[in-house]
């Protein structure tokens, strides 16, 4: 207990630290009662004014509070530095002795025509758009309260902060920033009255941040055919709900055709069979407008791919088909595709397992198509008639098949014999 004061009737007021409580011990020696909770770290001194109000020198940021008949603490003085450690009053004039820095302050008698209360610095934790400042006040006639604010991105106000600006109809006009400070300016036409502010409310909305979007598949340069699944990933640093739009362009982005819109999933199907073969741009746009309709942000990802739904062509040179003394069938041929490279060529005999053939001389012709030579030698065949099938895949997975019949004679002595060919093979162009 650092502070004691007696009123004219002999009641004793006791300031208790820590906690900042003021107790009243009645003159008749009754039990102490809690008179006021000043919500201060310490009460250093108390004094009574002629009107019966109690004034307390408190610590540490608030310096002086005044307690009226309603027993509620009203802030009188707040400062960034200093401590109020001593008070005296004479005829309603309050003297306050402060230390660090050492100052003597004088208040009254009565109230000042105006005063201001500067708030702490509020931290929105990230850039925010500041909304309204509203307060609950007992503003008697002839009194007024106005609010000003300033904002900045450093925790302490400095030259980079915006200047003080008066709120307009309760709307904070300070620019978006992480930190905000307000001050209230209280005015009274005469010293007998004073506005009392009981509550302040500040609203703000964190500034919407842009989502990110990335395509997982297809990858740039992929060849697509038939139904393909497009996969992507979207993230929003504000954890906003994202909606996606998927679009394609066949003219390098001059015009776009919407494939899907307003989907929440991270994938969709694209039936490329409805497209002409060729090069396309595929674009996914992520938007957070569902969560932040007033200030939607979006991000997009695009990739250039090829659509190829036309099978390649494959052919066996009739004249090349032969069965050697080793009873292996041999043939040469070709495969070609108008748009994408031949990815693989395989053969099988009599519907057995497909075996891959080495790709030789894969090249793109002057006409822009991809051509490959192929050469097959089968395993040793039993005597009799056999089916030899060849198939080729283009880069998009489209397939072409060709088939010939091969007859292996029981006795295959001497030179290789020409065998009958049951399936005609088209000759390669060019
Ligand atoms: Ca966002
Ligand atoms: Ca093709």
Image: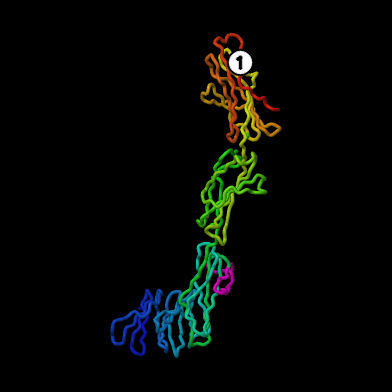
Estimate the x, y position of residue 318 in percent, counting from the top left: 64, 20
Estimate the x, y position of residue 306 in percent, counting from the top left: 62, 40
Asked whether residue 263 is in view, the answer is yes
Q: Is 168 contained in the magenta span?
A: yes
Label 1, secondary structure: give it.
Answer: loop
Drawn side of residue 364 relative to residue 69, left or right: right
Chief SS of the magenta region: loop
Q: Is 363 contained in the magenta span?
A: no
The residue depicted at 54 percent of the width and 75 percent of the height is 147
Find disc 1 in the rendering and name its residue: 419
Mark 1, residues whose alpha carbon is within 10 Å: few (<14), some, or many (≥20)? many
Asked whether residue 77 is in view, the answer is no
Magenta residues? 155-174
Query: Front-most of 267 and 80?
Result: 267
On screen, residue 282 above or below 326: below
Query: Front-most of 240 and 423?
Result: 423
């Amino acid at each position: 207990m650092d502070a004691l004061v007696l009123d004219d009737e002999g009641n004793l007021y006791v300031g208790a630290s820590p906690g900042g409580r003021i107790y009243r011990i009645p003159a008749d020696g009754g039990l102490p009662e809690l008179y006021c909770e000043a919500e201060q770290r310490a009460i250093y001194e108390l004094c009574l004014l002629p009107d019966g109000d109690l004034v307390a020198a408190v610590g540490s940021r608030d310096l002086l509070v005044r307690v009226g008949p309603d027993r509620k603490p009203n802030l009188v003085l707040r400062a960034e530095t200093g401590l109020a450690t001593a008070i005296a009053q004479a005829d309603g004039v309050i003297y306050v002795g402060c230390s660090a820095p050492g100052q003597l302050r004088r208040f009254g008698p009565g109230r000042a025509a105006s005063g201001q209360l500067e708030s702490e610095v509020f931290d929105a934790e990230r850039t925010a758009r500041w909304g309204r400042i509203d307060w609950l006040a007992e503003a008697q006639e002839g009194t007024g309260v106005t609010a000003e604010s300033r904002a900045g991105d450093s925790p302490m106000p400095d030259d980079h902060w915006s200047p003080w600006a008066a709120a307009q109809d309760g709307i904070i006009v300070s620019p978006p920033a992480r930190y905000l400070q307000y001050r209230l300016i209280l005015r009274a036409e005469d010293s007998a009255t004073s506005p009392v502010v009981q509550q302040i409310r500040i609203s703000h909305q964190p500034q919407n941040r842009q989502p990110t979007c990335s395509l997982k598949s297809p990858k740039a340069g992929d060849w697509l055919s038939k139904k393909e699944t497009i996969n992507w990933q979207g993230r929003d640093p504000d954890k906003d709900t994202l909606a996606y739009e998927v679009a394609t362009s066949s003219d390098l982005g001059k015009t776009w055709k919407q494939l899907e819109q307003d989907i929440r999933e991270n994938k969709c199907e694209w039936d490329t069979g409805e497209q002409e073969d060729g090069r396309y741009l595929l674009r996914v746009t992520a938007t957070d407008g569902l969560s932040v309709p007033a200030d939607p942000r979006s991000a997009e990802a695009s990739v250039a791919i090829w659509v190829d739904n036309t099978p390649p062509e494959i052919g066996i040179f009739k004249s090349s088909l032969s069965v050697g003394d080793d009873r292996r069938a041999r043939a040469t041929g070709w495969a070609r595709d108008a748009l994408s490279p031949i990815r693989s060529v395989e053969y099988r005999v009599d519907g057995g397992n497909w075996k891959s053939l080495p790709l030789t001389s894969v090249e793109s012709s002057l006409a822009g198509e991809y051509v490959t030579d192929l050469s097959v030698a089968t395993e040793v065949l039993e005597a009799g008639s056999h089916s030899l099938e060849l198939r080729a895949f283009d880069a998009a997975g489209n397939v072409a098949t060709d088939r010939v019949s091969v007859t292996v004679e029981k006795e295959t002595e001497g030179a290789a014999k020409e065998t009958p060919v049951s399936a005609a093979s088209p000759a390669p162009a060019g």
